Image: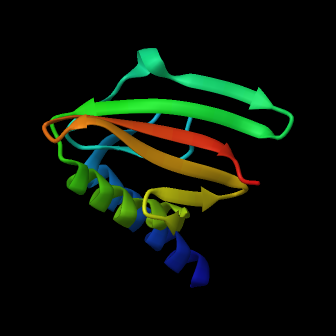
């Protein structure tokens, strides 16, 4: 019964995420791209180091910073990410930081994954 409950919970989390986003960022484990945004793959950066991986990815769209912040604050914890700060999360020895450039309606979001020290 416990296994069925876990499987059902996992299915519901992924269903909720996929209803609000269309895809996951390339190179990241379980970091969704918010609906209304598209990944900017030409700017992706991936390094494997002895201390862990370093990944940088971007998504852009006609969204507001407030909507993006709200989306990731509610979605990432459902995927196992622990919130460390306003736009900083941790999971499995890695730290995810979310940054912004541009303005509401023409926003670019930078996702940076580094080993947690």
- 98 versus 85 height, above or below: above
Q: Is residue 31 visible?
A: no
In the image, 11 versus 34, the foreground residue is 34
In the image, 51 versus 36, the foreground residue is 51
In the image, 63 versus 4, the foreground residue is 63
Query: How far from the left and from the top, in percent, is residue 10?
Result: 48, 66
Residue at horizontal 59%, vertical 83%? 2
Q: Is residue 2 visible?
A: yes
Q: Farthest residue to the bottom: give it.
A: 1
Q: Quadrant of the C terminus?
A: bottom right
Quarter occupied by residue 56:
top right
Residue at horizontal 83%, vertical 40%? 51
Q: Farthest residue to the top: give it.
A: 42
Quarter occupied by residue 22:
top left
Residue at horizontal 67%, vertical 51%? 94
Residue at horizontal 38%, vertical 63%? 73
Q: Is residue 91 left or right of residue 34?
A: right
Colour scheme employed for the rendering of this structure: rainbow
Q: Quadrant of the N terminus?
A: bottom right
Query: How far from the left and from the top, in percent, is residue 14?
Result: 40, 57
- 48 versus 67 height, above or below: above
């Amino acid at each position: 019964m416990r296994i069925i409950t876990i499987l059902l919970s996992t299915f519901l989390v992924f269903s909720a995420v996929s209803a609000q986003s269309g895809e996951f960022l390339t190179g990241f484990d379980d970091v969704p791209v918010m609906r209304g945004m598209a990944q900017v793959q030409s700017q992706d950066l991936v390094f494997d180091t002895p201390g862990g991986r370093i990944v940088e990815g971007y998504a852009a769209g006609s969204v507001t910073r407030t909507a993006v912040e709200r989306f990731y604050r509610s979605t990432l914890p459902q995927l196992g990410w622990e919130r460390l700060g306003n736009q900083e999360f941790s999971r499995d020895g890695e730290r995810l930081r979310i940054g912004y450039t541009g303005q509401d309606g023409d926003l670019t979001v930078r996702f940076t994954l580094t080993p947690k020290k």
